[in-house]
């Protein structure tokens, strides 16, 4: 644990405090949800036998779908879409109306958390997210506090509404950005090619950066727990920019805080396990450390050799991934061939293995929608033989 940050004063709840009092209390809605009809995704994350390999896609609800674009136009803006539980529910369910996916993921954005901290999130067409008040000096960082009560209620309302609308069809995934990834956007003020501003803080003022990361870790923990309380059946932490860090800095600035979050995110709700997934883009170097961080599954980007990853981790956690998103621009037979390669790379399943098929990163907005249908059908069809060994053992 970075020592400099420990001496820095802050108002965030200390991680030594294991109380469940959240900085994000929310209005509890009805939790009488329909029984789950397809639990294949959850079973795979928990490394329990399944009849086939489940599949969902990062950004599966998005701009590649005409119906999404129409809903966004009605909403007026991305934030108008994300902050309206009815629109968020509609968009979340759109890909499930087209494809037999094995999970839904909450439609939202990782930057809703810093937006609720007062940084003023907005989206610029063609440029992506921007913050009106980035954290560029000591005063701004020291003045930062976790999201105030009620500021993210629209997210939790959406989670509950989506669970009701799903009617038990498939599980719902909640998510957050990692503390480091949120910090990148909060300091840079948006996306970046080199993250020079936040990395300057890392090397010149590590005390300030670790103060920010501690606050983010508290906020992410409370945010994920509140999503679980509202109805999320699995949660995922996106460490999108962890791979931009040098070895050593990754462990101090990203992995450490993800461990702290995972240690305090609920493992079950009402006696039912809630699997947790971590995904560090560019994190192939640190797979063993990610697997030991406390999650049930580790997501892999498309640069990682899936066979080698499984050997390295020896089925201690489930794996998620890792088709190159660009494959979806190819012809149908090539998509099927590439799906087969990923399934073969993971190999035959055992009674304690788990694989969730996904892309190695988010789906491109230019993806032909029919390609996704080919992918999903191919995963379901071609994966069954890899589960025969487990079925035969149970017979």
Image: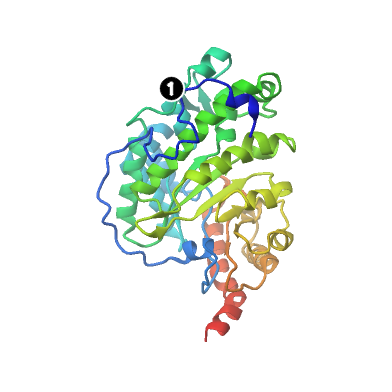
In the foreground, 39 or 6? 6
Q: Is residue 223 left or right of residue 248?
A: left
Residue 127: quadrant of the picture: top right
Residue 209, how many percent across, how many down?
A: 61, 24
Taking the spot 24% from the left edge, 50% from the top edge, the residue there is 30
Q: Does the rendering let one see residue 24?
A: yes
Which of the image's four quarters has the N terminus? top right
Residue 98, how many percent across, how many down?
A: 43, 59
Q: Is residue 35 left or right of residue 178?
A: left
Taking the spot 54% from the left edge, 58% from the top edge, the residue there is 372
**Residue tagged 1:** 118
Instruction: Assign a secondary structure to mark 1.
Output: helix
Q: Does the rendering let one see residue 190?
A: no
Residue 92, how many percent across, how many down?
A: 40, 49
Taking the spot 63% from the left edge, 41% from the top edge, the residue there is 255
Label 1 crowd (10 A; few <14 / some 14-19 / many >=20): some
Residue 269, how many percent across, how many down?
A: 38, 54
In the foreground, 287 or 76? 287
In the foreground, 251 or 370? 251
Furthest-bottom residue in this view = 395
Q: Is residue 155 left or right of residue 281?
A: left
Q: Is residue 234 left or right of residue 271?
A: right
Residue 72 vs 279, above or below: the answer is above
Taking the spot 55% from the left edge, 40% from the top edge, the residue there is 260
Total number of numbered discs in the rendering: 1
- Picture colour scheme: rainbow
């Amino acid at each position: 644990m970075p020592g400099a940050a420990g001496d820095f004063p802050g108002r965030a709840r200390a991680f030594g405090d294991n109380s469940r009092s959240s900085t994000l209390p929310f209005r509890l809605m009805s939790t009488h949800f329909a029984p789950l009809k397809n639990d294949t995704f959850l079973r795979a994350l928990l490394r329990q036998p399944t009849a086939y390999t489940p599949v969902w896609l990062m950004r599966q609800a998005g701009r590649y779908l005409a119906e999404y674009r129409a809903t966004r136009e009605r909403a007026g803006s991305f934030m108008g879409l994300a902050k309206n539980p009815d629109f968020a529910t509609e968009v979340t369910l759109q890909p499930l109306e087209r494809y037999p996916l094995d999970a839904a993921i909450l439609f939202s954005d990782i930057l809703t958390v810093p937006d609720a901290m007062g940084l003023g999130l907005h989206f610029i067409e063609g440029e992506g997210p921007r913050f009106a008040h980035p954290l560029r000096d000591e005063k701004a960082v020291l003045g930062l506090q976790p999201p105030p009560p009620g500021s993210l209620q629209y997210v939790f309302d959406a989670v509950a509404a989506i669970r009701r609308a799903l009617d038990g069809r498939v599980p719902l995934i909640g998510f957050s950005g990692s503390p480091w990834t949120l910090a990148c956007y909060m300091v840079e003020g948006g996306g970046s090619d080199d993250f020079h501003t936040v990395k300057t803080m890392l090397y010149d003022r590590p005390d300030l950066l670790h103060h920010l990361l501690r606050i983010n870790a508290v906020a992410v923990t409370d945010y994920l727990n509140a999503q679980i309380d509202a109805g999320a059946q699995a949660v995922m932490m996106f460490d999108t920019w962890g791979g931009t860090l040098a070895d050593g800095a990754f462990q101090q600035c990203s992995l450490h805080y993800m461990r702290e979050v995972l240690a305090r995110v609920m493992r079950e709700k009402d006696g039912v396990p809630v699997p947790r997934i971590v995904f560090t883009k560019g994190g192939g170097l640190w797979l063993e450390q990610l697997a030991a961080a406390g999650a049930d599954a580790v997501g892999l980007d498309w640069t990682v050799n899936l066979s080698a990853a499984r050997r390295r981790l020896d089925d201690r956690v489930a794996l998620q991934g890792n088709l190159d998103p660009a494959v979806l621009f190819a012809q149908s037979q090539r998509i099927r061939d590439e799906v087969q390669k990923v399934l073969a790379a993971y190999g035959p399943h055992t009674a304690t293995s788990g694989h969730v098929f996904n892309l190695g990163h988010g789906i491109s907005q230019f993806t032909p929608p029919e390609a996704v249908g080919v992918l999903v059908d191919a995963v379901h069809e071609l994966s069954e033989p890899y589960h025969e060994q487990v079925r035969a053992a149970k017979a």
